Image (cartoon, helix red, strand yellow):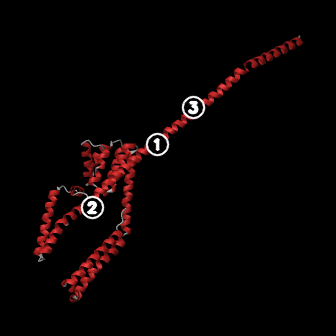
Amino acid sequence: MFGFDLGTIGFVVLAAVSAGGIAYVLLFNTISSEKTTERRLETVKKGESERSQARALREQNNEAARRRKTIQDSLQELEQKQKNKERSSTNPPLRLLLKQAGLEITPQKFYMFSAICGAAVGLVTLVAGANPLLALGAAVAGGLGLPRWYVSFKRKRRIAAFLEEFPNALDIIVRAVRSGLPFNDAIRMIAAEAREPVRTEFRRIVEAQHLGLSAPEATARMVESMPCPEANFFAIVIQIQSQSGGNLSEALSNLARVLRNRKKMKARVQALSMEAKASAAIIGALPPLVAFIVFLTSPDYIMPLFTTTTGHFLLLICAVWMGLGIFIMRQMINFKV
């Protein structure tokens, strides 16, 4: 009985192994084709994934290239506009000079004031006992020189006051934008609360926007009434941000930091050049001072310079050479940052 059971079990085992072998032989091609299909599917999926990654990378690179191209075109356009503005700012018209100086007068009134000033200077010179020809020259110089010098003085003073307050205004705009306030509302806040002349310049931006101009166009017009690089930097930042996007508050914050660093650099350069300026002032003042001392101690020795034709000619030559020397020294110590 034990042998029968063992033989039966052995037969069953052999039959099962034979059936498995026959099934494996019959299904070998199917199993191989399935494995091949799976490998092909994995290869296709892997290739598709790699192609998708490569396509996404190409699209990302193309988008970055398009943004770089847009920024480069914007910078080139702004550079061309700046060159055109610099050509016109080297000798701006009188109307623009008066606007930059903050004087609310028309060119006609300016010419009238110049004529009155020239007539007053000529009359004072004539009453002082000068030659009528000399009085006429003084009148011409007073009419053409003094009013324009005053306009230039007011213009430089106004630009200096603008540069003093402009970084603080940018900081206020940055805080307003970061707190969720729109850029146009921040501009209106500066136009209402800032100190002069920043308030007037930003008020002009608001008025230009009311007339239909966009924010980049309105800020670009600031350079006309405030001819300084800082105002041009502000216009460039706004225009680039409007075309290419980005974080406006971060850009304005960086601009404010750059303007403060420029201000510190100017102050440092001015402090380092004070010794040279003092030396130039002393050298320029020595000849008139020595002439005055000689006049006090020996007037007969120096009076021929003022009473003879040869003396007048020598004084003219000395004045020309002194003016040339002072101009050269001024150019040597006048550093621009």
Q: Amino acid at mark 2?
A: Lys
Mark 2–mark 1 Cα distance, whole angstroms, equals: 43 Å
Q: Residues within 10 Å of mark 1 (few under 14, many from 20)?
A: few
Q: Which dot marks residue 156? A: 2
Quadrant holding the C terminus: bottom left
Percent across and percent down for residue 132 are 11, 74
Depth check: 135 or 21 in front?
135
Rendering coords of residue 30 (x, y %): 70, 20
**Rendered-image quadrant of the N terminus:** top right
For marks 3 and 1, give the CA distance: 24 Å
Q: Earlier in the sequence, mark 3 or mark 2?
A: 3
Residue that carries the numbered disc 3 in the rendered image: 48
Instruction: Say left or right for 111 vs 258.
Output: left
Give the residue at x 12% y 77%: 131
Q: Identify which residue is drawn at 73% across, 21% down.
A: 28
Taking 61 as reference, is 221 left or right? left
Residue 171 visible, this orientation = no
Between the C-alphas of marks 3 and 2, the distance is: 66 Å
Which of labels 2 and 1 is toward the front? Answer: 1
Q: Which residue is mark 1?
A: 64
Work out whether 139 lies above or below 19.
below
Name which residue lies at 21% across and 86% down: 304
Label 3: state its secondary structure. helix
Q: Which amino acid is tagged 1?
A: Ala
Please identify, in this view, whether the residue under mark 3 or under mark 2 is nearer the observer. Answer: 3
